[in-house]
Image (cartoon, coloured by chain):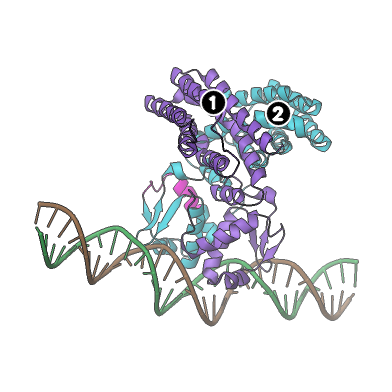
Chain colours: A purple, B cyan, C green, D brown
Amino acid sequence: MSTPGRGLHGHVLDTLGPAITAGEYPPGSVLRTDELAQRFEVSRSVMREAVRVLESMHLVESRRRVGVTVRPKAEWNVYDPQVIRWRLAGADRPRQLRSLTVLRSAVEPVAAGLAAKHATAEQCAELTECALGMVANSRGHKLEGYLIHDVAFHRAVLTASGNEMFARLGDVVAEVLAGRTHHEVMFEDPDPAAVTLHVQVAEAVRAGDAVRAEQLTREITVGALQELDILAP
Amino acid sequence: MSTPGRGLHGHVLDTLGPAITAGEYPPGSVLRTDELAQRFEVSRSVMREAVRVLESMHLVESRRRVGVTVRPKAEWNVYDPQVIRWRLAGADRPRQLRSLTVLRSAVEPVAAGLAAKHATAEQCAELTECALGMVANSRGHKLEGYLIHDVAFHRAVLTASGNEMFARLGDVVAEVLAGRTHHEVMFEDPDPAAVTLHVQVAEAVRAGDAVRAEQLTREITVGALQELDILAP
DNA sequence: GTGACATATAAGTCTGACTTTTGCCCTCGG
DNA sequence: CCGAGGGCAAAAGTCAGACTTATATGTCAC
């Protein structure tokens, strides 16, 4: 799903990014470009490009005569998909997963409500198709198939909302759902009630019932939050 | 509020970033680093660093033998504060403002609810202080003073929610509120009802009444949305 | 102690040469 | 006429070295 580092500077980022987001270098730590270039066996030009990218993510700050200092966590661009991926792959994965799920619980219901108002016929069709796909894969340990349709469903809702900010959260939701299936314990088939809720959301959007779509989606996200509490109370 | 471009590459970004986000180069447009370097009168190294940053924002994609191609709008990292600033300064400012306000309407009520549960005594104190500051500046054309406390209030709520993703939206809210005061028409004093709502939110958070804090904040954001509809129906 | 000044340090910049990938075109064979 | 294969060239990618600039810090005079 993620894009592996293109070029040398990308390879450097694939190592440095996760290290920084994992807290391996505490805030205030000072790195020197030349030293990093030697460590990664790349030229200074390449290392400078990598540092610029980290700087644009607000992970570090580069100052003359000082070096490259790691910024406090609170200043990181935590919405950057790359940063999200790095953090999800690292140690504070559970914390990150919780933050993202709370974000989902705020955004998705509103998005569903908007989708009920703005969705085109094609979008409604895709939505019901996804929901049907979820039903078809809800029994018999077809977890991968279920995941694909689940992701597609939530992506479709966010897109159909007509709000670009919501639409761009599709990747985030995809990461969260994939994480639940792959990393967390999920041996059994998905909760039938959740599957039903998705079908009902598709119906509500098709019917243009914004309030109902929002309320049903809220129930879905509440379920997702409870799931987290059960796994790590 | 924004950070002016540090160094030469920053200066290049200050020009190229707004140009791209403004749609001056339509998706699929091809730029060449050498040509850009000449145009901005910087070395290729500097231009390459700038391109890397634009690439990390998913605004462009650099490929060998092709050049630097502008990506479609739908792929941009629209949560990057820098991108948000560029777009707010550009032509589709109204559209962007609307998207962000809808996002606020989804996030802030939930954040307020969480704040009611998690806020510390200090955070409650700061919240009421901000609300009082808003009241003090709500009459007599003290718009700047009002804005400062308004921003501080919403920032405090988002921070007190305890969710880092919410907290990082403080800058976004600040931009939106500042935009309303500075760019949109706002000659008169703020709506007294809105001021009252802020005070009541502070009270609800202090009292730990999550439902009430969420509901009141929802009223605030509904007001913000209506304000937009009045300005551009 | 305080201010001005000197110094060392690390980032910032530029240049030029070289390497590597890859889109494109041309040819050749079916 | 068309498709496969090979060669060409364009543009990004990489590197090394020299130079510039800002600035933190230490020093010295007052």
Give the residue type at disc 1.
Pro
Q: Which mark is residue A192?
A: 1
Q: Quadrant of residue A18?
A: bottom right
> Which residue lies under the disc numbered 2?
B113
Q: Nearer the viewer, residue B162 or B25?
A: B162
Q: Nearer the viewer, residue A141 or A159?
A: A141
Q: Are marks 2 and 1 in contact (CB under 8 Å)?
A: no
Q: Is residue B206 left or right of residue B152?
A: right
Residue A66 visible in the shown view? yes
* Residue B25 belongs to the span the image colors magenta: yes
As displayed, is residue B149 above or below residue B51? above
Q: Nearer the viewer, residue A60 or B155?
A: A60
Q: What is the crowding at mark 2: few (fewer than 14 residues within 10 Å), some, or many (at least 20)?
A: many
Q: What is the crowding at mark 1: few (fewer than 14 residues within 10 Å), some, or many (at least 20)?
A: few
What is the secondary structure assignment of the residue under circle 2?
A: helix
Residue A2 in picture, x, y percent from top left: 49, 50
Q: Nearer the viewer, residue C22 or A175?
A: A175
